[in-house]
Amino acid sequence: MTDIIQNNGEKFGEFSATHDGERAGVLQYEWIDDNTFDIVHTEVDEHFGGKGIGKSLISEAVNFAREKNVKINADCPFAKSVLEKDDSTHDVFVN
């Protein structure tokens, strides 16, 4: 089972994924302003590749953006690619 927890700071934050108790991946973001955060890095441990953990991390970021009524920018190439391809995220994705 994959669990994702968030640590949101004033300037930086991250979503961390664990799978069956092992650290599986992380999505790091930086607040650009009060209304937008930038996904700067997404990483999944190679041991957990192909399990959808990266997309789950992005999904959590999208849910967070919707809850807080803020927008997402993505400098991370993986996150940008996922968000661009998923029309359902275009309400929060601004790249």
Image: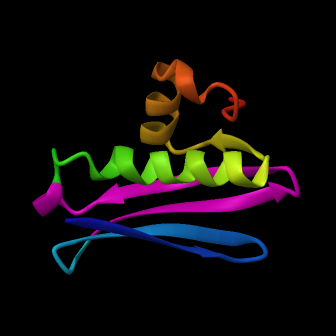
Q: What is the image's colouring?
A: rainbow
Q: Which stretch did the figure color magenta? A: 24-48
Q: Position of residue 49 (x, y in %)?
A: 16, 51
Q: Position of residue 13 (x, y in %)?
A: 62, 70
Q: Position of residue 20 (x, y in %)?
A: 16, 74
Determine the residue positioned at 46% across, 20% down.
85
From the viewer's side, name the closer residue of 27 and 65. 65
Left or right position of 74 against 26: right
**Magenta stretch: dominant SS?**
strand
Picture quarter containing residue 68? bottom right
Determine the residue positioned at 47% across, 46% down.
59
From the viewer's side, name the closer residue of 85 and 43. 85
Farthest residue to the bottom: give it. Answer: 21
Identify whether 74 is placed above or below 90: below
Determine the residue positioned at 47% across, 38% down.
77
Identify whether 11 is placed above or below 75: below
Q: Look at the image and tell me in which quarter the N terminus lies.
A: bottom left
Q: Position of residue 8 (x, y in %)?
A: 65, 73
Farthest residue to the left: give it. Answer: 47
Picture quarter containing residue 91? top right
Q: Is residue 51 magenta?
A: no
